[in-house]
Amino acid sequence: MLESSCAGGGILTDRKHRLGVLASGRGSNLQAIIDACADGRLDAVVAVVISDNEDAFALSRAKDAGIRAEFIPWVKGKRTDWEAKAVEILNEEGCELVCLAGYMRIAGSTLLNAFKNRVLNIHPALLPSFPGLHAQEQAFDWGVKISGCTVHFVTDDLDMGPIILQKAVQVREDDTAESLADRILEQEHKAYPEAIGLALSGRTELTGRKVKVK
């Protein structure tokens, strides 16, 4: 939910919505977002991809798509400095929404205050169950019958922000943790563009911690 959507109607613009993506790894969800922009499922463009990992394949995906790709070195204990530089770049590119896509750092107040209610994340489990790392393995080891993925707004509480949408994945008797993770990832690639579209549409309303779709 973009801040302006609360006041009634979302962002009015004569150009496509501009997205910023933070990524640390291979960027498969980034690719899903790029593809959704390219084929018209999202009325948006990825304006910039920023990584804390110089070798992240997400940066290569961005360059291949003609998208600005920026590496900001991560210095331990300097989260505020890193986020300040990222915010500067995101603002340079006019980003309206920031999407975490395999970004392996905890978002801090510098980023969250600059993009209040405009930072999204995708998590490979049905939150609030199995937050944190290795969620697919957590779900598999727990023996759940249904798992899935969650797209949510990012808050100070790790993986506990208001939920935009979820997609369920049945756990099969012959599943392994790896096969379950692969099928969850397939749903992530559908869920993230869909949730971004809702967040940009002006049809979402945040009441307490609940995201209502009008």
Image (spheres, helix red, strand yellow):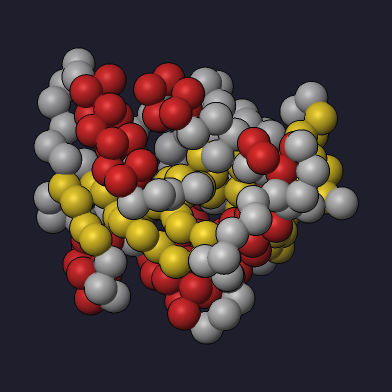
Residue 2, image x and y in percent? Answer: 63, 42
Residue beneath the point at 22% across and 23% down: 81
Residue 44, image x and y in percent? Answer: 51, 66
Residue 18, image x and y in percent? Answer: 46, 58
User: From what the image shows, is residue 104 above or below residue 199?
Assistant: above
Residue beneath the point at 43% across and 49% down: 95
Image-based side of 136 in relation to 168, left or right: left
61 or 95: nearer the eye?
A: 95
Image-based side of 48 in relation to 173, left or right: left
Image-based side of 29 in relation to 209, left or right: left
Residue beneath the point at 49% across and 73% down: 37
Residue 121, image x and y in percent? Answer: 52, 44
Q: Which residue lies most toward the bottom here?
A: 39
User: From what the image shows, is residue 85 above or below residue 156?
Assistant: below
Report the number of numbered marks: 0
**Residue 69 visible (yes or no):** yes
**Residue 148 visible (yes or no):** no
Image-based side of 197 in relation to 55, left or right: right
Q: On the image, which quarter does residue 91 sit in?
A: top left
Q: On the image, which quarter does residue 157 sit in?
A: top right
Q: Which residue lies most toward the top here?
A: 77
14 or 30: nearer the eye?
A: 14
94 or 55: nearer the eye?
A: 94
